[in-house]
Image: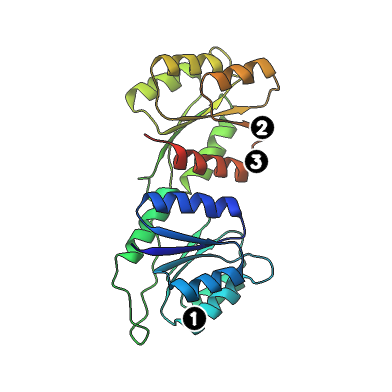
Amino acid sequence: MITILVVDDDRMTCDMLAAVFSRQGYHVLTATSGREALELFRRHRPRLTLLDLRMPEMDGITVLREIRAIDPVAAVMILAGGVTDDQENQARELRVTDFLRKGLSLNVLVAAVDRVVQQPAPAQSGALPAQGSVSLGQNGDSILVVDDDPLILDLLVQFLSLRGYRVRTAQNGREALALVRQESPHMILLDIVMPGMNGVEVLRELRAQEFAGSIVALTGAQSEELLQEAWNLGSREVISKPIDLDRLLMVVQLGFVLAEY
């Protein structure tokens, strides 16, 4: 079994990626600090290391230098979120195998990992693996965003599409249901308060149709009654407006990890 080491100071990220790659048949080790990562690397010599650059105490660049001292050709993928140009340049000088943005669709990330581990492992004295980039084509998980505010639709389409998700939109409940009948999405981001047909009514219809995907409720209202009904009808999470995009992304990623479609 191929071993992957995931290094990130965010325990939730480690757990999520461990779940994703375990389901793909990999043996996954996780570390939430640089020192723990190096200990695991020395002991297990993973086929691939997924490494966060921004960590306290010992940052990813320092970890990468230590890994290169142990194994000059070890496959290391950087998971970059908010890094500086200088950090990125240092990582590339240290011959990272790939450099990926945090927040990519999990399908895109899994494809990138599969591509690396399927290549023959280079001997320490041999040539270095070629660096590459991942295409963000719209072949990832599908999301339907339903909101009567066109500005929110545009924001979420841009945000999610850049991360590899295939996104469709609807500005009202009836349009959303029609799109679901045409092609059922894996996930729906659903505004609860909309004119004409509100989100709870859409949820009732989806439940009647036995919709199998995940549903995340979006709301700018604080109606406990509506939110409770949305929860009872199968909404897995509630995201308040104005939308915290980082939290939304984590909810979306976790939704795809947990979904069984």
Marks 1 and 3 sit apart, C-alpha to C-alpha, by: 37 Å
Q: Which quadrant: the N terminus?
A: bottom left
* Residue 192 sits in quarter: top right
Circle 2 — which element? loop
Q: Residue at x 51, y 70 (%)?
A: 40
Q: Nearer the viewer, mark 1 or mark 2?
A: 1
Q: Amino acid at mark 2?
A: Lys
Q: Residue at x 54, y 73 (%)?
A: 39
Q: Nearer the viewer, residue 238 or 244?
A: 238
Residue designated by label 2: 241
Mark 1 crowd level (few <14, some 14–19, many ≥20, 10 Å Cα): some
Q: Which mark is residue 68?
A: 1
Residue designated by label 3: 244
- Eyeballing the image, is 12 above or below 65? above
Residue 26's x, y, as percent? 37, 57
Residue 241's x, y, as percent? 66, 32
- Eyeballing the image, is 139 above or below 221? below
Q: Amino acid at mark 3?
A: Asp
**Residue furthest bottom in the image:** 125
Q: Amino acid at mark 1?
A: Arg
Q: Nearer the viewer, residue 154 or 70?
A: 70
- The reply to whether dot 2 and dot 3 touch (C-beta < 8 Å) is no
- The reply to whether dot 1 and dot 3 touch (C-beta < 8 Å) is no
Q: Which quadrant: the C terminus?
A: top left
Mark 3 crowd level (few <14, some 14–19, many ≥20, 10 Å Cα): few
